[in-house]
């Protein structure tokens, strides 16, 4: 038997309910012919996990283990799987149904963890996964770091590299809401590409931390006219923003008109402020392009992991809950941090302490 973390169903309306979490024991899975058995070392939270507990995310499941992000050690392989994988540290792909089409998923897309759309989550000590749905974990990353970047890294990679049209050295990028996992991934990618990255936040401490890891500067969105302060800090030979990577929505269009070059892009991967935002004629006249962006394809995931390995990038980990899946007190505290927006980086759970201390 192996442990798994799931939600417990209780009565309550969407947005008002908050499903408890509990640990259950399930049969230890054996790999099918093309599968790998993986002992999960670490798993990471995303906002969707918090939304699931409030029934604010589609198809919540009370039997599928939580979490889409995970890294672990291959402990057994199926009869037709490549022997190369045995004993390797691997990162699981967080989504299914999207192979390589740059426009969008070829099939119905599903994300791992906590829903009935795909019966797999990384909040389980041992699981089995198809061998073509893993990448070898870069050797320079710890288990927690390996679990910290799959979903947010893929989302950030697609937004900046695949969609913005400006992922090149010397370009100016504005990243809103720094502190969240996607925004930090975009920042790290941008810095590694030689871009000039600027950030916004309502917390000056988060802006200061972003500058320490490579941002050229930042402003508080709580300041009236913050866009003027930002413009004043841009390079004299390129006094405009080339692209905005935004996860908030709200009044970003009115700010974009003042900040972006003609033909600049706003890449939208989320709308935490509101599910709607204005699109103005001023943006049209400036030829600004608004581009929606989601996670990404299996191809983009592979490219992203290769980039992380090549550049020796280390994802930002805000906090690790140790002691395994049974440490519900600390795991619940991680959910509280997401609710309150206190984190700077990813919130990670040490799933199998003995595996995390392995030298494999």
Image (spheres, rainbow, N blue to C red):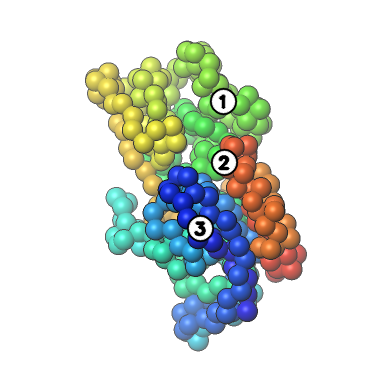
Task: Tell me: residue 289, above or below residue 76.
Answer: above
The residue at which mark 1 appears reads as 202
Mark 1, Cα crowd under 10 Å, few <14 / some 14-19 / many 20+, is some
Q: Is residue 253 left or right of residue 188?
A: left
Identify which residue, 250 or 311, lies in the foreground. 250
**Residue found 64% across the figure and 51% down from its top:** 332
Task: Tell me: residue 28, above or below residue 170.
Answer: below
Identify which residue, 241 or 95, lies in the foreground. 95
Q: First in sequence, mark 2 or 1: give its number.
A: 1
Pointers 2 and 1 in contact (C-beta within 8 Å): no
- SS of the residue at dot 2? helix
**Residue found 66% across the figure and 27% down from its top:** 205
The residue at which mark 2 appears reads as 339
**Labels in figure, total:** 3
Q: First in sequence, mark 2 or 3: give its number.
A: 3
Residue furthest bottom in the image: 79
Q: Residue 246, percent across and down?
A: 43, 34
Q: Residue 21, percent across and down?
A: 58, 58
Whole-Å distance between the Cαs marked 2 and 1? 15 Å
Q: First in sequence, mark 1 or 3: give its number.
A: 3
The numbered dot on residue 10 is 3
> Which mark is in front, 1 or 3?
3
Q: Is residue 212 left or right of residue 275?
A: right
Can residue 189 be seen here? The reply is no
């Amino acid at each position: 038997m192996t442990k798994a973390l799931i939600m417990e169903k209780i009565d309550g309306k969407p947005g008002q309910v908050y499903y408890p979490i509990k640990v259950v024991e399930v049969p230890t899975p054996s790999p099918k012919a093309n599968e790998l058995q993986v002992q999960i070392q670490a798993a990471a939270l995303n906002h969707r996990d918090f939304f699931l507990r409030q029934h604010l995310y589609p198809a919540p499941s009370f039997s599928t283990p939580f979490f889409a992000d995970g890294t672990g050690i291959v402990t057994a392989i199926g009869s037709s799987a490549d022997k190369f994988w045995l004993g390797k540290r691997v990162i699981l792909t967080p989504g299914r149904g999207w192979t390589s089409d740059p426009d969008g998923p070829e099939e119905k897309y599903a994300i791992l963890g906590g829903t009935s759309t795909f019966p797999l989550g990384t909040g389980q000590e041992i699981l089995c996964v198809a061998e073509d749905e893993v990448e070898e974990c870069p050797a320079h990353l710890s288990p927690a770091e390996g679990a910290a970047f799959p979903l947010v890294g893929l989302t950030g990679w697609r937004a900046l590299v695949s969609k913005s049209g400006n992922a090149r050295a010397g370009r100016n990028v504005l990243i809103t809401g720094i502190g969240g996992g996607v925004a930090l991934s975009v920042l790290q990618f941008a810095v590694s590409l030689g871009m000039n990255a600027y950030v916004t936040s309502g917390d000056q401490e988060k802006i200061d931390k972003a500058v320490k890891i490579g941002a050229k500067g930042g402003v508080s969105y709580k300041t009236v006219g913050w866009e003027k302060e930002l413009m004043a800090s841009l390079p004299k030979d390129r006094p405009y923003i080339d692209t905005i990577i935004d996860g908030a929505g709200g009044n970003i269009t009115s700010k974009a008109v003042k900040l972006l070059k003609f033909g600049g892009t706003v890449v939208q991967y989320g709308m935490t402020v509101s599910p709607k935002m204005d699109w103005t004629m001023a943006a049209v006249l400036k030829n600004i392009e608004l581009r929606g962006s989601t996670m990404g394809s299996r191809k983009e995931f592979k490219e992203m992991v290769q980039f992380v390995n090549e550049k020796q990038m280390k994802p930002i980990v805000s906090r690790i809950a140790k002691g395994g899946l049974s440490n519900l007190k600390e795991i619940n505290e991680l959910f509280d941090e997401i609710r309150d927006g206190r984190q700077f980086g990813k919130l990670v759970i040490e799933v199998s302490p003995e595996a995390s201390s392995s030298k494999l």
